[in-house]
Image (cartoon, grey):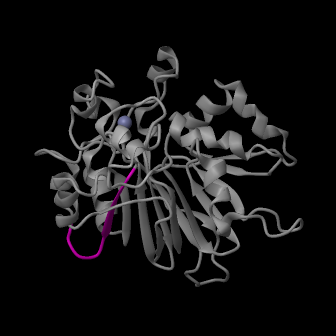
Amino acid sequence: MRVKVLGSAAGGGFPQWNCSCANCSALRLGTLKARPRTQAQVAVSPDPSKWFLLNASPDLRQQINATPELTPRSAALGSPVASILLTSADVDSVMGLLHLREFQPLRIFSTVSVRRILTEENTLFRVLARSNPPAIWDVMPLDRLMPLVPPSSLGKKDGLFYKAIPLLGNFPDYVSESLRHSLPPEEAVIGLQLIHKEKRLFYAPALPGIGEEWRRSVDESDLALLDGTFWKDDELISARRSRRTAREMGHVPLWGDRGLLRQPFRPGKTHHVLIHLNNTNPVLNEDSPEHRTVREAGWEIAYDGMDFEL
Ligand SMILES: [Zn+2]
């Protein structure tokens, strides 16, 4: 299974257009040892003819055009992008669906609640129904292994499977309060496990809290791309960009006693990689002590174009 990181930053990207934090300012001046990053986007492929997008970022058009594997091969074969799996209804996870609207038949996988928010509460997404056939919305059941690509023949293990693991976050702010409270919270934010030929990927760009179940999924995976949004819980308050803590925004910070880096993951098998990095996060600065701490803990930091073969 190929896993490509097309974008590695949190919402807003790096630098963010309206941000003058220490990182964004120094990156613009060229005085920061760091790479610019587009908003988090991952693509997964069991074979070169098929690519699955994990979420649809606001930078998706640019990200697809920058990735030769995702270019359409011929008029008959069309685009190798056929399906999108959504981990939440957050703007950063779904806005790119509008980039895919050019009369392309698509399959979109999400929880029932995310589908309801996008197709019933936001009429803009009805643009996806203009293709022939119109976009198909598939419901992802929770905690159940489901096929995305069936095995080539009986007994073969070459199929691609997924499992949606509930992470218990919140529905996005743009959803009306009455609807938000009527929807089951376990359908708000999920982590995705993808399995192909016994190799496993776990993808969770937002981890609202610490949970035994997703930690187990990380431990049984060969590669885990996990929420690296914030270094500290009060990061945006210190940068005067928000009054809310990282946890209040649905992201476990990296640092601190209950931070992601302190979680007792099983050492050995799993390749741990941080993704969805907010532009204020000091780990983006490759000369920073925080960057060094992450690397010394055995973690990697995702960048645009990072590529894995599992
Ligand atoms: Zn910034």
Direction from residue 209 to residue 189 in the image, left or right: right
Per the rendered image, the range of residues in magenta is: 266-275
- The residue nearer to you, when weighing 44 against 182, is 44
Q: Residue furthest left?
A: 257
Q: Residue at x 20, y 71 (%)?
A: 267
| Location of residue 14 with respect to 192 vertically, above or below | above
| Percent position of residue 134, x then y | 81, 44
Image coords of residue 146 (percent x, y): 55, 61
Query: In the image, is residue 267 part of the stretch drawn in magenta?
Result: yes
Residue 182 lies, with reference to residue 50, above or below; the image says above
Instruction: Examine the rendering and report whether any part of residue 93 can be seen.
Output: yes
Q: Is residue 153 magenta?
A: no
Residue closer to the observer: 223 or 289: 289
Give the residue drawn at x 76%, y 40%: 128
Looking at the image, residue 181 lies above or below residue 55: above
Residue 89 appears in the figure? no
Q: Position of residue 59 (x, y in %)?
A: 59, 45
- Quadrant of the rendered image holding ligand 1: top left
Above or below, 32 against 244 in this view is below
